[in-house]
Every structure is written in structure tokens, then in C-alpha cells.
Amino acid sequence: MMNADDAPRQPYQQYFEWYSGQNPAHLIGKSRDAESIFRKTGITFAVYGHADSAEKLIPFDLIPRIISAKEWRKLAQGIEQRVVALNAFLDDIYHKQEIIRAGRIPRALIEKNSAFLPQMIGFRPPGGVYTHIVGTDIVRTGEDQFYVLEDNARTPSGVSYMLENRETMMQMFPELFHRNKVQRVEDYPMLLRQSLASLAPPGCKGKPRLAVLTPGIYNSAYYEHSFLADMMGVELVEGSDLRVMDGKVKMRTTRGYEAIDVLYRRVDDDFLDPLTFRPDSALGIPGIMDVYRAGNITIANAPGTGISDDKAIYSYMPEIVEFYTGRKPLLENVPTWRCSEPQSLQYVLDNLADLVVKEVHGSGGYGMLVGPTASKKERAEFAAKLAARPANYIAQPTLSLSTVPILVKKGIAPRHVDLRPYVLVSDKVQIIPGGLTRVALKQGSLVVNSSQGGGTKDTWVLED
Amino acid sequence: MLGRTANGLYWMFRYIERAENIARLIDAGLRMSLTRSGVTDDDWDGVLQSAGVREPYGEMHDKTTSVDAIDYLLRERANPSSVMSCFESGRNNARMVRTALTRDTWEAVNECWIEMKTLLAKRVKPADLPEVIDAIKRRVALIRGAFHGSMLRNELYNFARIGTLIERADNTSRILDVKYYVLLPSVSAVGSSLDNVQWESILRSVSAHRSYSWVYDAEYKPANIADFLILNGQMPRSLSYCYEKIVSNLGYLAQEYDERLPAHETADAMLRALQALSVRDIMDKGLHEFLEDFVQRNNQLGQEISEGYRFYQ
């Protein structure tokens, strides 16, 4: 966040004028206040595999990450272009498959991919929208230079942190919001509700009824599910509340069964319908896919969107964007080696110490190797896994990520961050100005995932 | 509202009510051991029995000691009715129905659970017990206050209240039932100091040793105590009071849904029966038989409510 002369970058100027008048010890105290607000409110997440610590707080850093209006406009244009391309891509591969016929993407990559759902072939979701909610992961490497890391077109999480972080900052530092004109993120739940309601299925007569589907209180993102349902004023349902009756999906209320028109599901495709996908799933609703295909419910995001944010597809994104929008991508893709290709695999094995290797289907920072920080032994173990199942991996160079300041005991220190803006798609594309900034709290670390010791901070997009 | 939400509210408040009642039982037990010379650990058997956990306790412990009994009642995870388990289940239910709770109510429940996890992390030292019991009562009072002060008076409120009152009626009758032998008029023991301690402990376990004196003068009489806890409509833990409120909350639901269910008939019949009885009738027919029958019908009502309002599949 510093420029070459070691002065704060322009968007931070106001903030640092304020900061220089603050007592660091007082700010550290505020940090603890913030933590107790989060704990009291129950803004926690579950780390799978940790026996005792069922609920953890994501550390919150109280120095905002600040983006200028100009920078944001550029970013938003790039994101919109990408999201439009993602939807066009999904519509194409579930219909005419022109991109395959044009030889831009290998057929096997799509059809042999477990995220590709044959059940979606020939079906067009209400409004033609596949990805109602997208969370594009972005990193900045320099002035005006942004890379997209992942497209997250399935069920991106974290938006509740964007909102709670802002809420907390406004509670603790109201004066900062007088000095800086920060664009609003608070409308997100309202916009989400409107956006979902506008895509009600053809079978819905009258005002659409919405619900959020959660796997339940033991899910790591349960807080967010309840938060969003609460803020939108809709029911929070579990699979056991729902059943298919008279060709509709209905929920069991104290008055009997009532139909749902739009389901914002926070359950993976695999678990959505035990009749169609995993028969052992207790989280889903048997028969919901039939109701969906009959046009009697909208599922957001549409089943089968996972094929578009698959890590194996990611490396083709520049081609995908160009194919559907007719223009060069505005945002960069990180150069990616597909380990399924022998030449690439050899390169990756030879340069493991400089690369980040990810599982094609992994998420949450699990099952990945960060070459530069891994031990020799870890790299050797990973090389064996790679050689055994090369198609399961991709590799990328470690980018020289930009840093932002965080508050530490001694004052401020630079740490690496990424950014996940949230995008709502209906008949228009709306990008909430800001998003979730995740920060690697360990000095030098590049891993920002909350399950791996990352934290979050409020993200400000300034007005012009 | 979802059937599961009604279920969650109902059980959330049953568990919170139970946690408080268990804490009171422990309090009464402690008081007894303070005021009686030559107190035996057998007295804790009575407490465990009132809490309905004498049998499962016996499966874990060869004999009853005050230390083990208190720990079992306060902290034992294997005991679903221990204070900690109740708060755990109460909060889990609260998380499940979070979208139905005001922020104040949710935070009161969550903060209660946070404090209890620390307070009850280890065995509580005897010297710290009074403070811990106080903290439990205080936390429950805060939850109740936030709930009454902030929740809309709608169906959510009704289901929560019904949960509280069914649990409370159950607890009060169990407390009486376990001590019924004390209440049986027996010529030799009446008026002895032993009885006074026992009677006081009954009243203390429903936080009513003072209010009893306001109503019946400061003299313990078996018939008066039974009257107080069963029939006195002013006493907020009496069976009559609980049923008056259950009937009125169910009445709001019937109005709101424009539908009367079997549960409404059951509750009305139970209230009418209570109103028609005198304490003399109850004592004549046998207090134990009366209470046994009551607990069973109270459970049945809970069952009918959960079926009528589709709590489960």
C-alpha cells in the first residue's frame, strides 16, 4: 500500500492522517472489542477435523483495505466481463457446445468432469441465469494489475463477513466514515433478495416465496446461512423440512406444507437430490431435480455450474472470455500448468520449489502445496502424489502479491491479501463495491484461507 | 413458520428452564447439608431423583457422594439434563432457530453458553458453588428478560412459552413427588425440625421459601405446601399457573391458525381438572398417584403439540 517514495498510496491518505493521531495501544484494545463483538454475535466458523474447537473466530484486522473509485471501475468491468462469459459458457456447454466444436476446449475435459451434470443438458434455468451469485477471487500484483485466482461460481461464501466487518467498523470508528466517503455494501441482502425473486420460475404465480437451504448447524458456514436468511427475511430450511408434493417443492410449516419458488441453496450439487445424485445424501430433497426441470422452482446457483469454476477449466478462461464476449479479457488469468499434459507435468516436477500446486477439485486451501514455503520432505511427498495422479493437479507461479497494512503489536506491518467481490446476476450484473479481503496474518505467508490461519478486514471502495 | 422452527423454540426454552431448575435443586441440596447436622450423602439421592437422573447416575457411580452428585448435575456431558448439557442443547436449538429470535435473545443465550463453558470447564470447588449457581440463575434471568422484552407477541412467542411451561410443570411435579413422603401427615414427625428442613428445601428448590410465608404465614404445613405448588394460581411455578398460561398460549395459536387441535382439548381438560380440585381431594386420593398421572398427561400434551404443529416429519 506504499508507493515507491514510501508514502501511503493515494486512497490511504485520509486514513493515515487519522491513524497518525491514534494511540496504538488504544487501537489494540479496539481489536479485542471487535473480537468480543464477533464472539457474542456468534460469527464463527467450524474447522473440520478439529475435535474440540468446534467454533472459531476468524481474526479481524481493523485497518481497512482501501480501493479508489478509479481502480474499482476497472476491476468491476473486468469482473462483469468474466461473469457474463461464465454464464454464456454454461449455457453453451449444456446446449450446443459450440466452444467444443470450435476446438477451443477438449471435449473430454467437460464430459469426463464430475462437475459437469448431464441432467442439465438441454435445460435452461429461469432467465437463462446459471450463476446467480459469484465470488471472484482476485489478487493485485501492482498498480492497476489484477489477476483472477478463482471464479467461485458454485456457492461462494464469506459475504456475511463483508457485511459484519463493515458493521463492526462503523460501530467502532464512526468518525472514519465521516472523513472518507465509502461506497455502501449494506444493501447486499436486499439486492440478493430482489435479484433472486426476479428469477422466479415460470410455474410461480404471484409473489415468489424464497428460502435459504442449509446443511444445518454443524456446517462451517452455518452462521452465514442464518444471517442471510434473517437479513432477507426468508425461511432458513434444511432438507428434512422439504419434500416434493404436487409437482412443487414444499416446506413443512406449522400450518401444513407450503410451496417454495426460489431456493438459494448452500448445499453442493452432489447432495441436492438423492434420487439424481448421491443416494446417501440426507441433506437434499428427493425429486427436486424433476421439479426444477418442470419449471416449478428456481435453484440458485443452478446445478452444474461447478464446471465453470473448475480448476482444470480455469486455465482456459482467457479463451472462454474471448470466445463469448469477442474481446480480450480485461483481467489477467494466472499462468497455469495443467499437470495432465506430460510436458507441463515435467516442468512442474522440475520447478516444484517455485510453484503453487492445487488439487483440481479442492477448495479451502486444503490439499495444496506452496512450493516456496514447503519443506524438502513435503515437496518430495507431493511430487509422488503428482506423479501418481497428474490430472488431479494444476500448478501456478507464486505471484508477488501486493501487501496491505495490518495492525500488529508494534504498530503496522505489511501482509499479503486477496479480494473476493460479490456479484449478483439477474437480468443485469450487479457488483457490490467492496467485498471480502482475506489476509495472510503470518509474516510472508501467501495463504489467506480462514481454515489455514487467515484473517479478514473491511474493504472500502471510495467514492470519486 | 417451519415446523422445525416451532420445535426448536419449544426445546430451546424447555432446556433453558431445565437448566435453571437443576441449579435450584442443587442449591436446595446444598442448603440442606448446611442446615442439618449429621447430613448424609443419601440426601443427594433425593436430589438426583428429583432431577430424574438417579438411575443413569447409578450406572456411572457406585455410591452417591455430594461431590459426584453435584458434578453429575452440573457438568456431566453424558447426562443430558446436566446444567451444561441443557445450555448446550438450548443454544444448539437457538442456533437452529436463530432467524426466529431477536438479536437480544440470541445474544443472551450465546453469552450464557460462553460464560458457562468457562465456569463449568472444570469441577467446581465447593467454595465456588454458590457463585456458580448464582451465575446460572442470573444468566437464565437475562435470557428471559431479553426474550420478554424484545420478542413479538406472535406464534414464535407462544411456542417458546409453551416449552417453558410444560418443562416447569414437569419439574415442579417431580420435585413434589420425590418429597411426597415428607408431605404425608405422620403424627410423630409433624413439627419436628427434620421436617422443617425438608419442607424448606422443597420451597427453596422452586425459589419460593419467602413467597410461601407471604401467602400461608410462616408455618410449614403439608397441605399448604401442596396447595401452593399445585393449585395456587399466583405461584408462577405451580401446576395451575403453568396450565393457565399453557391454555392461553395455545388459545392464541388456535386463534391465529383458526383451528383447534387435540392438544387444545387436553390442555383445557387438565386446567379444568386442576380448578375443580381442592388440596384435600388430592391428599385423600394420594398425592403420589395424582402427580404420577399428571406427569404422564403433561408429557402427552407435549406429544400432541409436536404432532399437531408438525414439529417432526
Image (tube, rainbow, N blue to C red):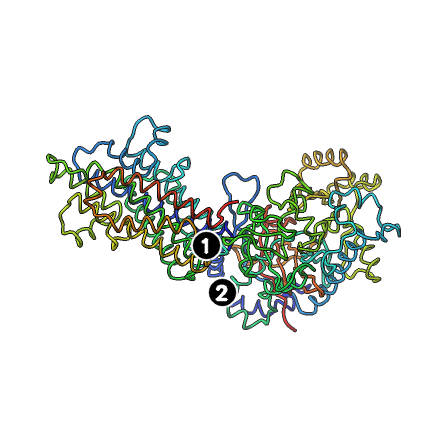
Q: Is residue A381 left or right of residue B166?
A: right
Q: Earlier in the sequence, mark 1 or mark 2?
A: 1
Which residue appears at 28% of the width and 39% of the height?
B126
Task: Give the distance between the C-alpha atoms of the residues marked 1 and 2, in whole angstroms.
Answer: 15 Å
* Chain letter for the residue marked with disc 1 in the picture: A
Q: Quadrant of residue B102?
A: bottom left
Whole-percent x, y for residue B169 in the image: 32, 46
Name the side, left or right, on which A187 lies relative to B51.
right
- Judging depth in this view, the residue of A295 and A26 nearest the camera is A295
**Looking at the image, is mark 1 or mark 2 nearer the viewer?**
1
Residue bearing mark 2? A171
Task: Indicate the amino acid at tag 2.
Answer: Gln
Residue B305 place in picture, x, y as percent: 43, 48
Q: Amino acid at mark 1?
A: Lys
Q: Tell if the residue under mark 1 belongs to the same chain as the one under mark 2.
A: yes
Identify the element where label 1 is drawn. Answer: helix
* Residue denoted by label 1: A40
Q: Residues within 10 Å of mark 1 (few under 14, many from 20)?
A: some
Please tell me whether mark 2 sits on a helix, a strand or a loop: helix
